[in-house]
Amino acid sequence: MMDSYFIRVFVIPSAVFLSAIFGASYGSGREVMEFVSSLGPTGGLVALATVAITHCLLLTLSFEIARMYRTYDYQSFCKVLLGPGWIIYELVILMGMLIALSITMTVGGTVLEDHFGVTVWVGSLLIFALVVGLNYYGRVIVEKSMMLSIAALFMVLVVLVVQLLSGYTDQIAATFAEEGHASGGVLTGLKYAIGGGGYLPLLLYCAMGLRTRAEAFTAGVFAAALAIIPATIFHLAFMVGYPAIVEERIPTYWMFDQISTPLMLNIYVVVMFVLVAQTGVALMQGLIQRIDNWQTQRTGQALGRLGHAGISAFVIVISLSLGSMGIIALILRGYTIMFASFIFVFVVPLFTYGAYLVLKNRSAKS
């Protein structure tokens, strides 16, 4: 089953990519609010279109290069793309991983505190257990858990869309009619997309099943399209409470509380918490792939399960120390730092030399 065309091309790459970006880019809604909905109804749509196009280009090129050179960990991928400069990406991605994991731990703990009244540390410890436990059992279990999590997310989103269509279309239409168009959607969308998409080399283990150029491109386009759906639905739902919702610390929590039923709010909190944890799982699996590759080259054998769990635990503990900055501060500072860094060490090289490699390979085959 896991080797079928549908699973290899459509399901695994999309589930891994969306799982990886959901916790640090979508989960709380604060990120969508800062980089999309704060621009107003139409300005937000421009930002979303920019995010979708940027993710599509990043994914298709990265998947094809990984397939061509069989580089499924970020170190070997960056050696192809950057040559001796690969070490710069490694320094950037390690810093970025700590920022993303800090956002993940903070968001997860805050959601459980706000909804169930438990201390933030309980949620953080649960995320710690999920990240360490799933990475202990390995990549196949990680990918299966992500597929189940994304399926649960889209079930919740379908219910939310039905509720919006049945009772709030007039309010959303009124917001679009009353609010003027805000400029800056393209630049803000680029910042948002690159700030999250720059982690893509960590996730290339999801491209191991891609066998042809057509499959790589299909997987990239589909993953980008699927990943923008939750942000689009959240943006439209936020327009029900716009502009007051801009000040909410966790806009998705407020949104479900106002629009949906208490049961759906409870379900979303659980699904969101699991997907926030899955962001940590996805990023840690990328780091483990890199370390396993290094260990195999050095000793001929990858690390065992306990080694994988130990690495996960060590990185998570370090990231916890950054969580005291607060959600909004972490998001704004983290995206600013990562946007600037990823531009130089990933996006520009990918869109220039990476695109050249892809085109050159096509010409050689012709």
Image (cartoon, rainbow, N blue to C red):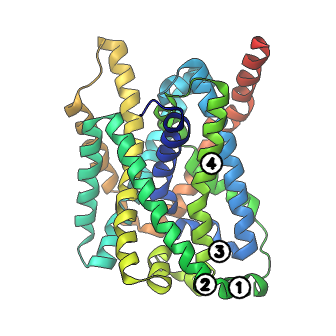
The CA distance from mark 3 to mark 4 is 22 Å
Kind of residue sitting beneath label 4: Ala
Kind of residue sitting beneath label 3: Ser
Q: Are marks 1 and 2 in contact (CB under 8 Å)?
A: yes
Percent across and percent down for residue 99 are 44, 52
Snapshot quadrant of residue 264: bottom left
Earlier-in-chain disc, 1 versus 3: 3
Earlier-in-chain disc, 4 versus 1: 1
- Above/below status of 178 relative to 269: below
Q: Residue at x 67, y 54 (%)?
A: 51
Judging by the rendered image, the residue that carries numbered circle 1 is 175
Kind of residue sitting beneath label 2: Val
The CA distance from mark 1 to mark 2 is 7 Å
Q: Are marks 4 and 1 in contact (CB under 8 Å)?
A: no
Apparent side of residue 152 relative to residue 127 in the rendered image (left or right): right
Q: Secondary structure at mark 4?
A: helix
Judging by the rendered image, the residue that carries numbered circle 2 is 240
The CA distance from mark 4 to mark 2 is 26 Å
Q: Secondary structure at mark 3?
A: helix
Percent across and percent down for residue 202 are 48, 37
Crowding around mark 1 (Cα neighbors within 10 Å: few <14, some 14 to 19, many 20+) is: many
Earlier-in-chain disc, 3 versus 4: 3
Q: Are marks 4 and 2 in contact (CB under 8 Å)?
A: no
Earlier-in-chain disc, 4 versus 2: 4
State the mark number for residue 38. Answer: 3
Crowding around mark 4 (Cα neighbors within 10 Å: few <14, some 14 to 19, many 20+) is: many
Q: Nearer the viewer, residue 261 or 48?
A: 261
Judging by the rendered image, the residue that carries numbered circle 4 is 224
